[in-house]
């Protein structure tokens, strides 16, 4: 296992997205967007048409279907013919978190080649946000977090993290279903428990206990989304002895119940 590559997606899981859906827009012939600078990132799924995107000093021609990622704080513009665009603005606002796309931006193509599986996640984010409810907004944020993790998790420069923290994250990931003691984790990476806790707080903005719970919840969501696992099985596999505590934590984190994720996945599989 490549610990640094494995833990890079775990680091991305600690970043919380705030989503604003601009919607699906059809542009008139000859349409162009003047150069502008936004405080958020634009994630755009090009559903139809051809065009050119510019961001900073970079330029990319694109043809549908395609993805565009226009980073925050760079001046960018769009122009094209027959364009139909699904647009999501993604911002990170919590002061104790890093902005993953800002770290990636210098090396990220404006029109990256991404797997087709991301289409459905993006559609789920838009559909959830358009519910115009607190639960819908929370669900939309979660779908975008999944989208970002699957799109760029293996490219996040984990080397920017302290190597001992990278090893600690990978160790936690391998022990999601077992009781974890901070002193045992600290011995594994060669630090005192106090020093390790300080390292987590300084670089990830959360304690080891909170990060472990986030990793477990993220894995539980992935298991339920993949299908074939009940909420009770997911809770047991990931170390929850109290099913009600698992349900409460899951709902608080994702804005929906474990059962609703499993039911939605099952309905999506019906042909």
Image (cartoon, helix red, strand yellow):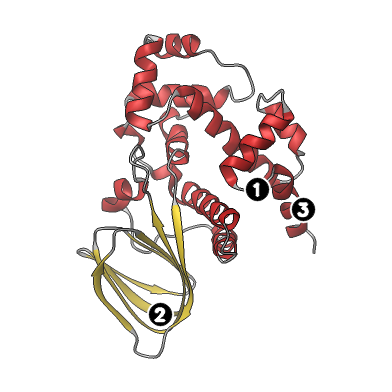
Residue 256, numbered circle: 1
* Residue furthest bottom in the image: 29
Residue, disc 2: 50
Mark 2 neighbour class, 10 Å CA radius: few under 14, some 14 to 19, many 20 or more:
some
Q: Earlier in the sequence, mark 1 or mark 2?
A: 2
Q: Helix or strand or loop: what does disc 1 sit on? A: loop
What residue is drawn where x is 60% and y is 54%? 135
- Looking at the image, is 149 positioned above or below residue 136? above
Mark 3 neighbour class, 10 Å CA radius: few under 14, some 14 to 19, many 20 or more:
some
Question: Which of label 3 and label 2 is nearer to you?
Answer: 3
Question: Which of label 1 and label 2 is nearer to you?
Answer: 1
Give how far across and how far down residue 139 sits, in percent.
Answer: 58, 53
- Looking at the image, is 1 positioned above or below residue 220? above
What residue is drawn where x is 76% and y is 57%? 269
Nearest the viewer among 42 and 205 is 205
Residue, disc 3: 266
């Amino acid at each position: 296992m490549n610990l640094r590559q494995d833990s890079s997606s775990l680091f991305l899981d600690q970043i919380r997205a705030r989503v604003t859906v601009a919607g699906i827009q059809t542009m008139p012939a000859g349409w162009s967007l003047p150069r502008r600078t936004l405080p958020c990132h634009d994630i755009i799924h090009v559903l139809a048409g051809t065009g050119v995107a510019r961001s900073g000093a970079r330029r990319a021609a694109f043809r549908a279907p395609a993805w565009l990622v226009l980073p925050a704080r760079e001046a960018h513009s769009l122009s094209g013919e027959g364009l139909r665009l699904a647009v999501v603005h993604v911002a990170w606002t919590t002061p104790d978190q890093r902005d993953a796309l800002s770290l990636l931006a210098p090396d990220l193509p404006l029109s990256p080649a991404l797997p087709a599986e991301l289409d459905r996640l993006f559609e789920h984010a838009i559909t959830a946000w358009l519910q115009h409810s607190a639960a819908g907004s929370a669900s939309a944020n979660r779908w975008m977090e999944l989208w970002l993790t699957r799109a760029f998790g293996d490219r996040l420069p984990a080397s920017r993290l302290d190597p001992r923290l990278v090893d600690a994250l990978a160790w936690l990931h391998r022990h999601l279903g077992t009781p974890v003691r901070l002193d045992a984790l600290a011995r594994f990476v060669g630090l005192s428990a106090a020093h390790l806790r300080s390292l987590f707080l300084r670089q990830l903005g959360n304690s080891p206990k909170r990060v472990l719970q986030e990793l477990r919840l993220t894995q539980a969501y992935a298991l339920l989304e993949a299908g074939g696992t009940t909420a009770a099985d997911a809770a047991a596999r990931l170390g929850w002895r109290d099913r009600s505590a698992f349900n409460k934590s899951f709902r608080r984190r994702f804005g929906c119940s474990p059962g609703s994720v499993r039911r939605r996945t099952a309905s999506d599989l019906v042909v």
